[in-house]
Each structure stands twice: as structure tokens, then as C-alpha cells.
Amino acid sequence: MNIINFTKAIRWMRRHKKLVLFVIIMILMAILASCMGSHAGAGTLAMGMLITGIDGGKHVVDGPLTTDLTNEGSPDLLLNEIDQQIVKIRPMSTPIDQISRFAGSKHTGSMVVDYYSVDTKPTTAKLTADVPETRTAVSGETPTVVIHTSNDEIFDATDTILVQETPGYDAHGESSQDLMLYVVGRDSNGVTVMAVNGPTLEGVDNCIPNIITGTTLIRMGRAASELDVQSPQFEALPKKNRNLCQIFKMQVEQSTLQRLANKEVGWTMSDQEEAAVYDMRLGMEKSFLFGSARKLWDNNKKEYIYFTGGIWSQAGKEHYIESPSDLTPDDIVKLMRDAFTGNAGSKRKILIGGSELISRISKLDYTRVITAGQHVSKWGIDFTELRTKFGCLYLLLSEVFDEVGMESDGIVIDPEYIQKYTHIPFSTEQLNLKESGVRNVDALVMTEASCLVLRYPKAHMRVMIR
């Protein structure tokens, strides 16, 4: 009887294969869901949960304290990663690094950074040969003369030239301004010019007076005639420069026993990290200022080491303060003039210098022309503002200059034209030295591969007292 029933059951299952298959799948899904539910309950139990205490505090039950629970119950307890807090760690001590971080960096896919900068066309030249007085000319024509300068190439036809310390004359024959010349043409023989406001000699207007060697000639705007459609061409090609990213590293370790030991003050791993970040930034500041761009082969490591170039050597101008004692207002005016003229920079720049330079500037008796004393906060740094008609300088002492023996030196930088390139952004990484069997410590390594470049080098200037 049992065999007959079993045979009938088999036949029935064969006739209803789809139904049987469906039932089997549903049973398996129910079993799987039950298993997942039990595992989920175990996971929830392992993660723990938060409950509210008598005075509103949070407590963890049924599991360990995790970062997720900490952020949920006390969101201000844990610090952000160091790369987000780095700009808050003693910014006054590392102004170059600080400003570059606030300005943002460009990612580079290589340790070698090639960049282009555009310079400005020179505007001045010196006369290299005396120009004799010229009054002869064809009837009805203005007298012309060929002049020779230290840089003939900067002058083109239709340019105007201001001749310093050489008198020019108005229509009434009175001298009230410097002589101005008009460029007729330029070739291998020199620059052909005629006077715009020259003297009248023997009935000939706009004669050319005697101009002595060494006179400064200043290139001014072009002057076209009514029918002129074209003008001499002007082209500017960017100059290629190169810098290398340097891999900066700092490692912090704390043994397990040190972490567990009772301490008189709360000195934790976080405190060590902050001190390490400051020391790392201080080293980077020196490299960003005075480093030398080189690539060196390490025989022990069998690989190249990259060293970044500093911005001190990248600056395109130099200014020497000829003052054996205290500075005078004239010294500051000359410094400001050099810093803000002859370049395509902005009217707000930063002077970072050693203690001797800042000390001498601080001793100045300021006037209505030169004002100081106002404090300005930018990029997380407090500056003292120095203001003249040329522009504003933000002054800041940098002890880095003192450390490298350059107390009397400084650098004027234009923050608009300083660029940071980063190959490896500032990051932290936990090292598992315990699991690898190296030593029983908690270890953290901080890394950044970056470099600084100065775009428009003429907008930046080295300052030295001698």
C-alpha cells in the first residue's frame, strides 16, 4: 500500500513539475530569510546602541563604542582628519605654506612639474651714445635722428619715448616737461626718432636737443595717424620653467604601554600628531623658500630622491636697501616703488622677512605718505599693513629667515601669482606594525608630495639690506 501511494505521489509530482519547483524555491527563500534575520540581529547586537541618560547624556549598551556611535552621540568629540585641521596649526610660523593652502593647489600627475609664465615687455632703456643737437631738415619736414640704446628691440615704429631729465618745450617755447620722442622706424643701424616737443632753433620747429649717454628712455604708448589700419606686431611667448615635487613625510609612534600608562597631564597620540604636523610644516616652509630643485640617486635605496625648488630663487626682482643703520621713509618709498612697478602684479602684496628687516621697518617714523599700524587678518594670519601711494604691503616676521642666517633679508610675494602643485595630497595612514611583527606600537605616518611655483616672476622680489 505504501509503495502504491509513493508511486502515485511520484506520478503526481511529474505531472505538476512547475508547482513542485515553486514550492521548493519558496521554502528555500524562507530558510534564507530566517538565517539573514538571525545574522542581522547578531550584527545589531555587536554594534551596540545608544540610550539617553538621566541628564541627557548618551550611553552605549549591547556592544562596544565605535566611531559611528561617537559621531552620533557626541558629534564634536572626535577631531577631523589632520589634513582638514592642518591650516589651524600655528599658521603664523609657516606663512608661505599657509597662504598656498588657502589659495588651493593644482593636482599634478607627475613628480616633475612644467609650467609657463609670461613676462612683461621691458619699458626702459639707456642711451649708449650721445645725440648731437639736430636742426637741419628738408623744408616742411620735422628733423629726425638715429639713436642707439641698450635695448633697441623694445622700440617699434609709432612708439613714443619719454627722455628723462632732458627738457621739452610747449608751443610758447617754455620748458615745463621732459622731452618726448616719436619713433619713425627701427633697423640694424638704430632707432630713428623725431622730437614731439623739441625746441625751436633758427626757425626750425621740434629740433632735437643734445642728449647725453646714459639718459633713461621710457617707452610709452603708440601714436597712429588717421589713415593707419595696422600697427607693428606685438607677440608674447610664455617661458617654460620646471620644479620638482618633494615627498614630505613624518611618522608618529606610541608604544602600547605608553598609551596605557597613567600620565600627570593628558598627553595623547593626538597631541603628538599636532606637534609632528607643526614640525613637518616648518620643514616644508624652509624647503618651499630655499630649496634647490634637484634629482639625486640614492645608492642605498636604489632609487631617485626628488628635492623641490624654493621660491626665493624664483623671484624675478631684487631690491637692495643701502642703509648701514636705521631705515628712512625714503628707503621704504624706494622699496615700495620697486615692489609695485614694472610688473603685472596686484596692488596688495606680502613682505615676509627676518627679525632685523622687520625691526628696522618697525622703527620708522611714519608720515602722511607712509602709514602703518593697522592689523589685517587674511589666510588665517595677522599682518601689519604698510601703505603708500604705490600699494599696500602686509608685513610679517618669519623666523625661518633667522634660522637660515638671513635676518636682514625678506621676500615680497604677490599672493595672486603663487601656485601650489600637489602630486600626493596631505594624508595620514595608520601603520599596522603590531600585526606585521615589527614592534608593539601605534604608528601614524603623514605624507604630502608638493611644490610651489611663482607665476609672473617679476611680480615677486627679494629684499636685502647691505
Image (spheres, rainbow, N blue to C red):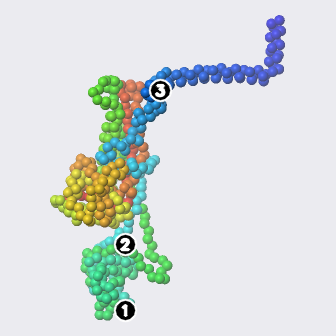
- Of circles 1 and 3, which is in front? 3
The residue lying toward the viewer, choosing from 61 and 241, is 61
Using the rendered image of the protein, determine whether residue 298 is visible from the camera's viewpoint: no
Q: Quadrant of residue 272?
A: top left
- Using the image, determine if residue 431 lies above or below residue 411: above
User: Going from the N terminus, do you reach mark 2 or mark 3 first?
Assistant: 3
Instruction: List the single residue furthest toward the top.
Output: 1
Q: Residue at x 33, y 89 (%)?
A: 205
Q: Please, what is the three-letter code of the amino acid marked with disc 2?
A: Ile
SS at circle 2: helix
Neighbour class for label 3 at 10 Å: few (<14), some, many (≥20)? few
User: Going from the N terminus, do you reach mark 1 or mark 3 first?
Assistant: 3
Tell me the tag on residue 154. Answer: 2
- How far apart marks 1 and 3 lie (CA) works out to 104 Å
Image spot of residue 445 (x, y percent) = 37, 35
Image spot of residue 117 (x, y percent) = 40, 59
Image spot of residue 159 (x, y percent) = 39, 77
- Using the image, determine if residue 292 lies above or below residue 270: below
- Using the image, determine if residue 142 lies above or below residue 71: below
Q: Residue at x 35, y 48 (%)?
A: 380
Tell me the tag on residue 258. Answer: none
User: Going from the N terminus, do you reach mark 1 or mark 2 first?
Assistant: 1
SS at circle 1: loop
Q: Please, what is the three-letter code of the amino acid marked with disc 3?
A: Thr
Neighbour class for label 1 at 10 Å: few (<14), some, many (≥20)? few
Q: Quadrant of residue 22?
A: top right
- How far apart marks 1 and 2 lie (CA) works out to 29 Å
The residue lying toward the viewer, choosing from 187 and 202, is 202
What residue would you read off at disc 3? 52
The residue lying toward the viewer, choosing from 412 and 435, is 412
Q: Quadrant of the N terminus?
A: top right
What residue would you read off at disc 1? 138
